[in-house]
Each structure stands twice: as C-alpha cells, then as structure tokens.
C-alpha cells in the first residue's frame, strides 16, 4: 500500500530522530547547487539544530548570496576526497533524483532521499533507508510541510527565507507554480512578515562580478533562433550562469531557451520554457530524460526548467535536443 503524505512526514521525523541518536547527520545537496537544494538543506540544518551539517560540492551565485543574507553555514566538500565524520549516522539527500546527482560518493550509512523529480536513475533503497518523492514544484515545499507538522517552533525567519527562495527559483518566479507552491510561499511570507516585493527585488539584483557579466553578454551575443516544430527556440553557448542566460532568453520572447556549456570535459544543457509552452504540453524534464536514452549521461527536471549532462560535444547535444523538440510537435500533429 502506498503511504500518504502524512505517513511520509511521520516516517521522515522518525528517521531523523532515530539516526540523530546514533551520531551526526549530513544533509547533502546536488552538484549544481541551485537555490532549492541549498535552501532545503540549510533550512533543515537550522530546524534540526546541532549535530547536522548541510554540505555539497557547489553553491550557485544566488544561493551563495542568500546564505550570506541569512548568515547560514554550508560546508563545501571535495568531490574527489570528501571528509566524512567517523561517527556519521546518516545522510539526508535533498533535491537529487538519482545517486549520481550529488556528484560525490555517498557513504555507506542509512540514507533519506527527499525529492520532487521523477527518478531517472533510482537509488538503491536498503533497510534503514527512506525515500520521499512528492509531485511538488520544489523540494522546499516538502521540507516546509515536515517542519510545520513536527517542529513549527524551530522554523526561524532565516529558514523561512531559505525555503521561500527555493520555491521562487524552482517555479521560475512563480510562472510554473501550482496551488501547493503558492500556498507554501504564502505561509512563509506571513510567518516571517517578509516584504515580498523587496524579497523578489533583492533576488533579482544579486550582483555578478565583471567576468560573469562579460561571459553572459558574450553568450547573449551569439544566440541563434529556430522554429522547432512550432516552438520558438533560442539557443546559445555559455561559460557561466546558464540559468541567468536562459531566463533572459525567455524574457526576450522565446518559447524555449537552451544553453550549452562545456563543464570539465562534459557537456551541460540547461533549458527553460515559457508558461505558454508548458501549457501546450511541453515538459522539459521528460525531454532531458529522453536525452539520457539518446546520448547517455544524466538528466531531468521540471516541465519548465530542466538540465542534462553527458559526454558528447555541445553541437551534438544541442542537435539532439532540437530533434527531440521537433519530434514532440510532430507527434502532436499526427
């Protein structure tokens, strides 16, 4: 029998309490270090309290700034040689659809997976492990639901800010939000008396250094456009801040934005879609899982925002994505 959400939350609270008695817990993020994974991990760290540590191998620009604003600690790990406590009793893995997404070897201790993606490569679930996978817009919503039910008095304003930022970024500034995401965000705003307009404005104005600004400008200067089976696609190459570039292309009128990047010898695709495109049935997360079938690697995400990483070159990866996009419209028109 499938557990309902209340049972999931109860099992999560039991798992945390049981393993905390045995030693420290690590709360591990995925390797892209976006705001949802960082916000979820760091909010859990603040709520659970001592003997926990939020950690991972990367922090995005926006996540780094929000951590600074909330005065929240995050431990960067060496992907080749992570140093785990000898007495580590468990690992909570947030916002990672599969075991390779943290980008690090997961220690042999009980693990708890909290995620909102369809699993492209399932975790091995052993005795003592727990997997919670909800169909929500962000992992932050799951963390909030657990905290409101089992530790409401420990949700401080900083945790609320971290979770709100995660929801905002994973819904594309609410363009892809559903009623659950909107309700969660509303409770966070009211609970911390957040000036929502100022909060959004401060997120939009997170400063980039001159090198990042230059790289983004170069990426935007080489944009190519194509009518891919009825969708207006804008695509380009970037060396940094692919999400910023993709979001700019959507704001400029693209139905779909695709940004490729060479990342340590592999290719990373970052895609965004407009609300109109997703309402027509486009699901970028499914497309990126199709990229895995086409070219290997790993990929997934949401309807309006998704990514893929693999070993083929950028031209091949971009061509593959365009072909999949055209196939989708071809099937719709049959």
Image (cartoon, helix red, strand yellow):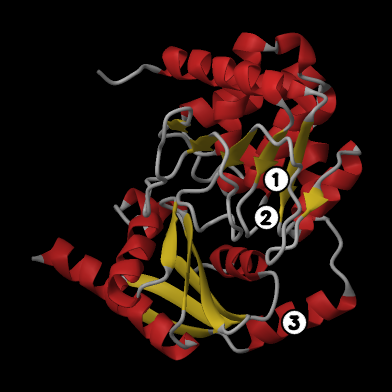
Q: Residue at x 84, y 44 (%)?
A: 67
Q: Which residue lies under the disc numbered 2?
A: 33
Q: Which residue lies under the disc numbered 1?
A: 38
Q: Which residue lies under the disc numbered 3?
A: 215
Instruction: Note whether 16 is above or below 200 in the view shown.
Output: above
Instruction: Note whether 258 is above or below 160 in the view shown.
Output: below
Horizontally, residue 116 falls left or right of residue 43, namely: left
- Looking at the rendering, in which quadrant would you find the N terminus? top left
Q: Provide the secondary structure element on which disc 3 rests.
A: helix
Q: Provide the secondary structure element on which disc 1 rests.
A: helix
Q: Give x and y (percent) for residue 272.
A: 50, 62
Q: Residue at x 76, y 42 (%)?
A: 85
CB under 8 Å between discs 2 and 1: yes
Observer able to see residue 64? yes
Q: Earlier in the sequence, mark 3 or mark 1?
A: 1
Residue ranking furthest to the front: 86
Q: Residue at x 54, y 64 (%)?
A: 250
**222 or 107, nearer to the observer:** 107
Observer able to see residue 228? no
């Amino acid at each position: 029998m499938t557990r309902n959400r209340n049972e999931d939350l109860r099992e999560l609270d039991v798992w945390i309490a049981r393993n905390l008695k045995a030693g420290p817990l690590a709360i591990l993020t995925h390797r892209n270090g976006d705001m949802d994974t960082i916000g979820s991990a760091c909010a859990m760290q603040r709520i659970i309290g001592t003997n926990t540590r939020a950690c991972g191998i990367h922090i995005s620009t926006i996540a780094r700034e929000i951590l600074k604003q909330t005065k929240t600690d995050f431990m960067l790990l060496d992907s080749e040689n992570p140093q785990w406590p000898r007495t580590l009793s468990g690992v909570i893995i947030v916002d990672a659809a599969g075991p390779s997404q943290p980008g690090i070897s997961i220690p042999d201790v009980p693990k708890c997976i909290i995620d909102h993606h369809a699993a492209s490569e399932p975790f091995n679930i052993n005795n003592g492990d727990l997997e919670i996978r909800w169909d929500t817009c962000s992992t932050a919503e799951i963390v909030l639901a657990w905290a409101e039910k089992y530790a409401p008095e420990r949700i401080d304003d900083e945790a609320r800010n971290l979770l709100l930022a995660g929801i905002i970024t994973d819904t594309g500034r609410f363009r892809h939000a559903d009623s659950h995401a909107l309700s969660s965000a509303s409770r966070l705003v009211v609970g911390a008396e957040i000036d929502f307009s100022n909060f959004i404005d401060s997120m939009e104005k997170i400063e980039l250094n001159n090198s990042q600004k230059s790289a983004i400008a170069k990426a935007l200067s080489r944009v190519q456009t194509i009518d891919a089976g009825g969708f207006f696609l804008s695509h380009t190459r970037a060396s940094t801040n692919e999400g910023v570039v993709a979001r700019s292309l959507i704001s400029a009128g693209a139905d779909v934005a695709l940004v490729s990047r060479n990342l340590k010898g592999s290719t990373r695709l970052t895609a965004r879609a407009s609300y109109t495109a997703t309402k027509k049935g486009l699901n970028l997360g499914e497309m990126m899982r199709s990229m895995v079938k086409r070219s290997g690697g790993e990929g997934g995400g949401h309807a309006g925002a998704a990514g893929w990483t693999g070993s083929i070159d950028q031209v091949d990866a971009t061509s593959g994505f365009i072909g999949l996009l055209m196939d989708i419209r071809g099937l719709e028109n049959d």
